[in-house]
Amino acid sequence: MLGKSPAWQDVDGACSGYLVEDDATRLLVDCGSGVFSKLRGVCDYTDVDGVVITHMHPDHFFDLVPYACALTYGPRGHAGDGAGDGSPSPPQLLVPGGATKFLNTLTVAGGQPRLLDGAFAITEYDPAQPARIGSLDLRFQPVPHYVPANAVEVRGASGGRFTFGADHGPTHALDDFAAGTDLLFLEATLPEPEEHGERGHLTAAEAGEHAARCGAQRLVLTHISDELDGDHALAEARRAFTGPVELARPGAVYDV
Ligand SMILES: [Zn+2]
Ligand SMILES: [Zn+2]
């Protein structure tokens, strides 16, 4: 777990970012603000095979910009000293539909129009289709949020399943998708449900209810600010989910 902050970082924290590894492949799920620094703390960023973005909110993708700068201007980047003589191949970047245009708008405004598509091999994924990065199999499930968002499942060769719900309001979309998953990360952004308008996030109690319906083996509450009461969130989730549940802790490692 690289970062678990919601849309603003915890003290010394990072927004959404989870590194999934097996013997052969490294995959970064989300790359929100602050995540690139945390990634550098645990591995060489040129050794990451792919990045998948759940949705185009800044707390889930903003650090693609410094990541692309490192891949472009860093000492081993395409524009650095190593260019042309064995520079690492660009990581795959899987983004939701329409995100390429969105990212281009961002980089054009910043005066570096080719920054992201020069640094990454970008593909817009279709959430109805599975994907594969190295030895890891991915599946997607659209979830209700303020912009198009997708839960993602990563399955390794051993068959172990990690499921991340992304950001979403209450939904039955995960009931089958995440049924029996080994490790379920669900957002617990809210201390209380939104009072007005469309639902786009969960409380910890609702996260517990979702995990119970999925029959998850293990639940981790994430996307929760350090300004909220974590013990209260845990107690709320445990009222609905009787399996193991814990609060996201940056730096934590989970075996699946
Ligand atoms: Zn969001
Ligand atoms: Zn978010």
Image (tube, rainbow, N blue to C red):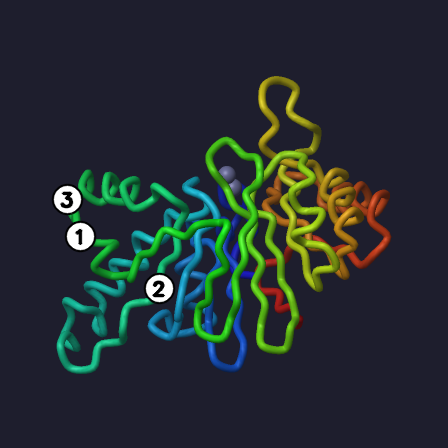
Mark 3 and mark 1: Cα distance apart in space: 9 Å
Q: Position of residue 154 (x, y in %)?
A: 56, 63
Q: Quick one: label 3 or label 2, which is nearer the N terminus? A: 2
Q: Is residue 148 above or below residue 123?
A: above
Residue 204 seen in this snapshot: yes
User: As rendered, which of 96 and 130 lies closer to the eye?
Assistant: 130
Comparing labels 2 and 1, the label whose residue is closer to the camera: 2
Identify the disc placed on residue 111: 3
Give me the disc on residue 114. Answer: 1
Q: Amino acid at mark 1?
A: Arg
Which residue is most to the front?
Answer: 129
Quarter of the image for residue 139 reads bottom right
Q: Viewed as shown, does residue 71 lie left or right of 209?
A: left
Q: Secondary structure at mark 1?
A: loop
Determine crowd level at label 2: few under 14, some 14-19, many 20+ residues with C-alpha closer than 10 A. some
Element assignment for label 3: loop
Name the residue at 50% across, 50% down: 128
Dot 2 amino acid type: Gln
Q: Residues within 10 Å of mark 3 (few under 14, many from 20)?
A: few
Residue 81: numbered disc = none
The kind of residue tagged 3 is: Gly
Of circles 3 and 1, the one toward us is 1
Secondary structure of the residue carrying tag 2 is strand
| Residue 133, placed above or below residue 110 | below
Disc 2: which residue? 92
Q: Viewer-proximal residue, 129 or 113?
A: 129
